[in-house]
Image: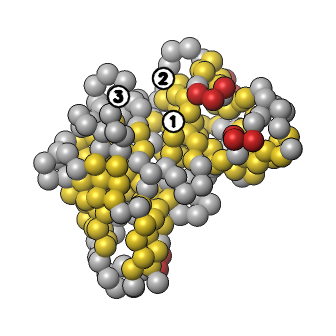
Amino acid sequence: DTGVSQDPRHKITKRGQNVTFRCDPISEHNRLYWYRQTLGQGPEFLTYFQNEAQLEKSRLLSDRFSAERPKGSFSTLEIQRTEQGDSAMYLCASSSVFGSGNTIYFGEGSWLTVV
Amino acid sequence: AQSVTQLGSHVSVSEGALVLLRCNYSSSVPPYLFWYVQYPNQGLQLLLKYTSAATLVKGINGFEAEFKKSETSFHLTKPSAHMSDAAEYFCAVNPTGTASKLTFGTGTRLQVTL
């Protein structure tokens, strides 16, 4: 079990550019979550998937943000027309509905800096 | 809505002293509660969780937490702090207990001094 993997770990982009982050969950975990964390704050929920279905989206997820999980395995989070306020760490997490289904495991995060 | 409040954004203790990090929750249904630790520039690591079994929960690295329904609290403790415990600690609540989303507190930064 290799844990939740995120790529890239760090991304610096110019304002207005698009960026995409990838998340590979723990194998056989059917739920996948995206959170955003800014300096000095706790993680804030963005969205989650059960298998390939996106079941909930936060109001924080503006129209410039889109998340997909096309085959129910890895997921991507795309931010279009980035703004400086998008600078944050984007955390991916996964869990299983079965067994000890209430435990959510996090990846190392992807840092985004918009300049 | 479910939420957690962490009292004290910064806590400083001497090495070997008791660590007490406070968390109070608000939930309309029986909650599942979690403590996570975050080291600089890293993701979150699960320390321990309460899932309606024993009210005193033991976690990794010598930490434990006690669920007190009457006080709506889930404070994190460790009898003797170690320098390696310096990190950010987050309390989180899962209101439905079915692997749905977590709601986090704002975190407490623990500093351990010699």
For the view shown, which residue lies furthest in the left direction?
A: A71
The subunit carrying tag 2 is B
- The disc placed on residue B46 is 1
User: Of residues B52 and A39, which is closer to you in this image?
Assistant: A39
Give the residue at x 39% y 30%. A102
**Exactly how many numbered labels are in the figure?**
3
Q: Residue at x 21, y 57 (%)?
A: A68
Q: Chain of mark 1?
A: B
What is the number of the mark on residue A98?
none
Q: Quadrant of residue A3?
A: top left
Q: Are marks 3 and 2 on the same chain?
A: no
| Residue positioned 39% across, 85% down in the render | A15
> Where is A36 relative to B86, above or below?
below
Front residue of B11/B99: it is: B11
The answer for how far apart the CA atoms under marks 1 and 2 are is: 14 Å
Quick one: label 1, few (<14), some, or many (20+) residues within 10 Å? some
Label 2: which secondary element: loop
Q: Is residue A3 above or below residue B64?
A: below
Quadrant hosting residue B102: top left
Picture coordinates of residue A91, whole percent (x, y): 42, 54
Q: Is residue B68 visible?
A: no
Check whether the beta carbons of the residues at disc 1 and disc 2 lie within 8 A of each other.
Answer: no
Secondary structure at numbered mark 1: strand
**Mark 2 or mark 1, which is nearer the start of the sequence?**
1
Q: Which mark is residue A101?
A: 3
Q: Which residue is mark 2?
A: B51
Around disc 3, counting alpha carbons within 10 Å, would you say few (fewer than 14), some (14 to 19), or many (20 or more)? some
B32 displayed left or right of A59: right
- Is residue B112 shown above or below A88? above
Q: Is residue A83 left or right of residue B62?
A: left
Circle 3: element type: loop
- Front one among B100 and A111: A111
